[in-house]
Image: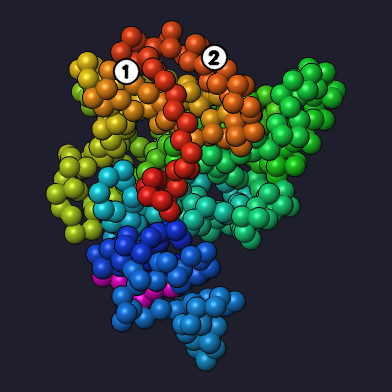
Amino acid sequence: MTDLAIMMSGHVSVPLYPNLNAETLGKILKHSEAKLLFVGKLDNYTDMKPGVPADMPCITFPFYTEDYPRWDDLTKAISPMQENIIRDGQELATIIYTSGTTGDPKGVMHKFYNFGFATTNAVNSLNLDNSVFFSYLPLCHIAERLLVQMGSIYSGSKVCFAESLDTFAQNLSYSQPSVFLGVPRIWTKFQQGILSKLPQKKLNILLSIPIISSLIKKKIQKGLGLSKARNIFTGAAPTPAALISWFESIGIVIQEAYAMTENTCYSHVSFREKIKIGSVGQALPLCDVKLSEKKEILIKHDALMDGYYKDEEQTNDTIKDGWLYTGDEGEIDSEGFLKITGRVKDIFKTSKGKYVAPSPIELKLSANKNIEQVCVVGTEIPQPIALVILSDRGKNKTTEDLISSLEKTLEIINPKLEKHEKIYNIIIIKEEWTIENNLLT
């Protein structure tokens, strides 16, 4: 409602993540020259508050305890606008600050036309009319904003919101959406939840019996909340092929998608009837794609960003001759399916002078269900090593079982790697990687 009000009143919205630290929040508010801040339901606003300038006017929403003027009180004596506001397509609609992987956040500028182009073409291509969406990801994220916010408005659909992290599973099961977007970590959590109640060996036996197999699949789908889902998307980071295949075995067809803030979340998607596991799908209509000499993925269409706010240098580095340089490395097959093979800048050099692309190796390692997160590193050391965070399942294993499992994974993966890529060791990290402790952007 706030975002739409900002648009209708002729202003520019700057959406913010609910878990920013005070320093980053302060930088964004200063850089964007924001004039007013809406403060919603936050877990740690006390920690964030030092980043809010003392003279910044703030408005809070009903039911929240911040000592700011309340939405309901401010709108009490105001008559709603009667006229239909239509903003010019070329006007700036929003500045979305993207964390990127290094340095300060960059403000991606999008005009109204970009939202119109991306939303209408995506909704029509994916047949999303009269859908039920489930919203739980931050609405400042381009995927949630485009697919759920803009997509639901354009397609005349319904949106169900998760009340809290504690009620997420219950809310999803109740909502039974027809469209669901999950980041890879969600799929891992879902898998862990299912296997904790129904171990893999038992599941395999039940799935091998024809009539029981169908009942088990329906029960799992309904329990998750995906029994009516026509489009089930995954994106934002690579999802292991083994995980997608596992869900397919229980009747849940996951469609990988690929896009970024800079192209209004409009790029590639796996259409439900045309899925190639291991690829992120084919280009959406009116989207051109090609690879540079370095195999960097380049995207071109009418809804690319207008640039980074107040940063001409970075803009010119990212958009050249009308093509968006994504920073991702890829391969395109004869049918136009795109496969992401890594980040152009993630490639590191070992002390032997050999280059290693970590992403494909990380995906292979993450097939081990005891691993939740993995990062392959090796700059200036003889051989790459893998840093891992254990999954709940992994944490509950005995040390002996865990070591045996990880050693087995290396025995399977290393023979398939080039000599200079072979993983020398796996190091288990105790501290989880989160945004709060600055280990994730």
Q: Is 193 on the left-hand or right-hand side of 341?
A: right
Q: Where is 16 relative to 235, above or below?
A: below
* Residue at x 40% of width, y 59% of height: 20
Which amino acid type is shown beneath numbered disc 1? Gln
Mark number, residue 281: none
For disc 1, the marked residue is: 383
* Residue at x 35% of width, y 71% of height: 50
Q: Is 421 on the left-hand or right-hand side of 43?
A: left
- In the depicted view, which residue is nearer to us: 89 or 96? 96
Magenta residues (range): 32-38
User: Marks 2 and 1, how far apart in space?
Assistant: 19 Å
Q: Quadrant of residue 180?
A: top right
What is the secondary structure assignment of the residue under circle 1? loop
Which amino acid type is shown beneath numbered disc 2? Lys
Q: Where is 109 relative to 385, above or below?
A: below
Mark number, residue 408: 2
- The x, y position of residue 2, in whole percent, is 47, 71
Q: Where is 11 relative to 250, above or below?
A: below
- In the depicted view, which residue is nearer to us: 198 or 405? 405
